[in-house]
Image (tube, grey):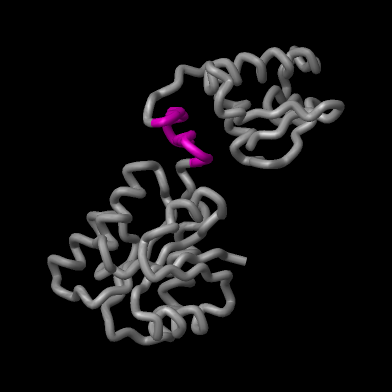
């Protein structure tokens, strides 16, 4: 089931949107407080964002998320209906723009269309403060580019695709080393050790945990 975040400060509209999108798992917010924290915990597929919010402007908040590597598609749902407002919304990371008052059927259709259009366009994987750009294969932690070998990037990518799952050394060998002749368990141990040293040199963040007798978990 797709997961959608809706940020809207008018409670009646928020309830109506949640009822209309009952085919999805919907998380509702009356302000941007707590949204970023949810994005770090849940695999969110879409954000529906009002622009006139208490304490912040919705599109500026989205632009801030984009600058930090969050790539969830966004539909603005707002009373700001001037041409320059709409253009500004797209410039600030919007994928679609709906003006109030709006049709519930149109909202459902737009949500479905955006989810369909963006489901295979994931270009950035993000976990905690790690950002992995799949197109450029650039890895950043806390905004700093990390120098990794091709193999280390493959290994990190495999971990990022399987967060909070126990990965046995055999599975890692099969998925990362593939047709390599150097497919030994000790090879995995050495590679994981080197990766840990590069992404967590002071051993403070504990991205990779060793699960005794089983393998590793990226968390």
Where 12 falls versus 163 (above or below)? below
Residue 177 inside the magenta-drawn segment: no
Q: Residue at x 34, y 47 (%)?
A: 66
Where 196 falls versus 107 (above or below)? above
Q: Residue at x 70, y 13 (%)?
A: 190
Quadrant for the C terminus in the image = top right
Residue 149, percent across and down?
53, 16
Instruction: Specify start and end residues of the magenta stretch as a single range.
Output: 125-142
Residue 143, percent across and down?
37, 30
**How many numbered tags mark residues here?**
0
Q: Nearer the viewer, residue 206 or 18?
A: 206
Residue 98 placement, left or right of 132: left
Figure quadrant of residue 178: top right
Residue 86, percent across and down?
20, 67
Q: Nearer the viewer, residue 31 or 114?
A: 31
Residue 185 placement, left or right of 65: right
Residue 136 inside the magenta-drawn segment: yes
Residue 145, percent across and down?
40, 24
**Which residue appears farthest toward the right when viewing the image?**
213
Figure quadrant of residue 8: bottom left
Figure quadrant of residue 62: bottom left
Give the overall secondary structure of the magenta segment: strand
Q: Residue at x 24, y 62 (%)?
A: 57
Quadrant for the N terminus in the image = bottom right
Q: Residue at x 48, y 48 (%)?
A: 122
């Amino acid at each position: 089931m797709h997961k959608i975040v809706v940020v809207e400060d008018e409670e009646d509209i928020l309830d109506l949107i949640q009822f209309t999108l009952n085919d999805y798992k919907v998380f509702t917010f009356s302000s941007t407080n707590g949204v970023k924290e949810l994005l770090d915990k849940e695999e969110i597929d879409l954000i529906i964002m009002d622009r006139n919010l208490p304490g912040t402007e919705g599109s500026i908040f989205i632009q801030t998320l984009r600058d930090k590597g969050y790539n969830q598609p966004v539909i603005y749902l707002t009373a700001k209906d001037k041409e320059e407002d709409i253009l500004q919304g797209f410039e600030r990371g919007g994928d679609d723009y709906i003006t109030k008052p709006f049709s519930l059927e149109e909202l459902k259709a737009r949500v479905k269309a955006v989810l369909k259009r963006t489901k295979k366009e994931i270009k950035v994987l993000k976990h905690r403060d790690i950002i992995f750009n799949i197109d450029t294969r650039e890895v950043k932690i806390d905004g700093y580019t990390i120098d990794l070998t091709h193999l280390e990037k493959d290994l990190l990518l495999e971990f990022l695709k399987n967060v909070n799952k126990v990965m046995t050394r055999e599975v890692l060998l099969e998925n990362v080393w593939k047709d390599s002749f150097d497919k030994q368990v000790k090879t995995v141990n050495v590679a994981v050790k080197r990766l840990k040293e590069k992404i967590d040199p002071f051993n403070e963040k504990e991205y990779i945990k060793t699960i005794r007798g089983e393998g590793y978990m990226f968390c």
